[in-house]
Image: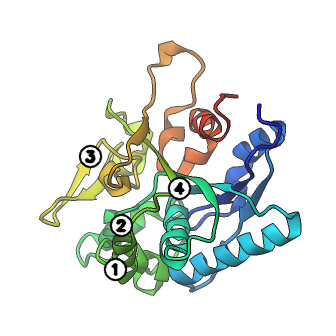
């Protein structure tokens, strides 16, 4: 293994916290890979642009404290990838002062979220929110008052700025997603094993090509292949329970973390 591993910045997702990285943090500790966890769980009513700026300040302070001014790897989950991309591609896109070797996104809504659009739908919204309350959204959740939900809608100004900026040629992008090709309801029971997505005609439909929350079409970026990790048949050995492949549990899935480690070091745990 490299005697001087590239440090890792971990960025959690919406309505989450740095503790979501517990399993991966243990693996990084074992491999003696330096890491830092960016915490935006207390961002209150801040929008994604404000949180992206906070990420930039966090990395700058971390560099000053550690004395590391070389490349870093960034691993982000869900909306955490949108935050990271905005900082790198919009805030730092012209200067390219931030040195990042690779950005590894888990289940990222890179093109916006159909679910965010469903949340504000006058007919379907209340039922969807009620189904997800306590699991993916907090009690009393009001999507109209949530700046992050508004930013991650596919046609939001935030998503438009990301699309216009585009990816950076000096960064290697990795996109890790899961899928439910067998259609097992236990994959994400709240949506019967499926994921909502929007068609080109802006019609809602469900697909097995997603993680229960984010569809593959929402994660895709031009020129970057999706690294799809589907549940394997039980006969193949001691594997994670099928619900660990869904969006909410991706950071706990040992196969996902093995893939991250492979990208970080070129070897598996």
Report the Cα–Cα distance between label 1 and label 2: 8 Å
Q: Quadrant of the C terminus?
A: top right
Tell me the mark number nearer the camera, choosing from 1 and 4. Answer: 4
- Circle 4 Cα neighbour tier, 10 Å, few/some/many (<14 / 14–19 / ≥20): some
Labels 1 and 2 touching (C-beta < 8 A) = yes
Q: Which residue is mark 2?
A: 112
The answer to whether one can see residue 108 in this image is yes
- Circle 1 Cα neighbour tier, 10 Å, few/some/many (<14 / 14–19 / ≥20): few
Q: Quadrant of the N terminus?
A: top right
Residue lying at 42% horizontally and 78% vertically, measured from the top left: 151
Residue lying at 81% horizontally and 61% vertically, measured from the top left: 68
Nearer-the-camera pick, 225 or 201 = 225
Task: Choose the circle earlier in sequence order: 1 or 4.
Answer: 1
Q: How many marks?
A: 4
At mark 3, the secondary structure is: strand
Report the Cα–Cα distance between label 4 and label 3: 30 Å
């Amino acid at each position: 293994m490299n005697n001087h591993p590239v440090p890792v910045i971990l960025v959690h997702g919406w309505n989450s916290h740095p503790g979501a990285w517990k399993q991966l943090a243990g693996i990084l500790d074992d491999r003696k890979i330096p890491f830092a966890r960016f915490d935006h769980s207390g961002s209150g009513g801040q929008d994604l642009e404000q949180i992206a700026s906070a990420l930039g300040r966090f990395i700058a302070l971390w560099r000053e404290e550690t004395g590391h001014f070389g490349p870093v790897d960034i691993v982000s989950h869900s909306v955490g990838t949108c935050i990271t991309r905005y900082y790198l591609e919009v805030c730092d896109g012209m200067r390219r002062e931030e040195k990042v070797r690779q950005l590894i996104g888990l289940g990222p809504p890179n093109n916006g979220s159909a679910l965010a659009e469903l949340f504000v739908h006058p007919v379907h919204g209340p039922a969807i929110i009620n189904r997800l309350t306590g699991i993916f959204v907090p009690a009393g959740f009001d999507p109209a008052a949530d700046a992050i939900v508004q930013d991650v809608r596919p046609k939001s100004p935030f998503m438009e700025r990301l699309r216009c900026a585009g990816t950076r040629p000096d960064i290697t992008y990795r996109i890790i997603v899961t899928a439910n090709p067998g259609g097992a309801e236990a994959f994400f029971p709240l949506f019967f094993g499926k994921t909502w997505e929007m068609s080109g005609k802006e019609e809602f439909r469900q697909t097995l090509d997603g993680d229960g929350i984010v569809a593959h079409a929402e994660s895709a970026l031009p020129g970057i292949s999706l690294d799809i990790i589907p549940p394997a048949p039980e006969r193949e050995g001691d594997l994670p329970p099928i619900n660990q492949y869904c969006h909410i549990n991706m950071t706990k899935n040992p196969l996902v973390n093995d893939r991250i480690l492979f990208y970080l070091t070129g070897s598996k745990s």
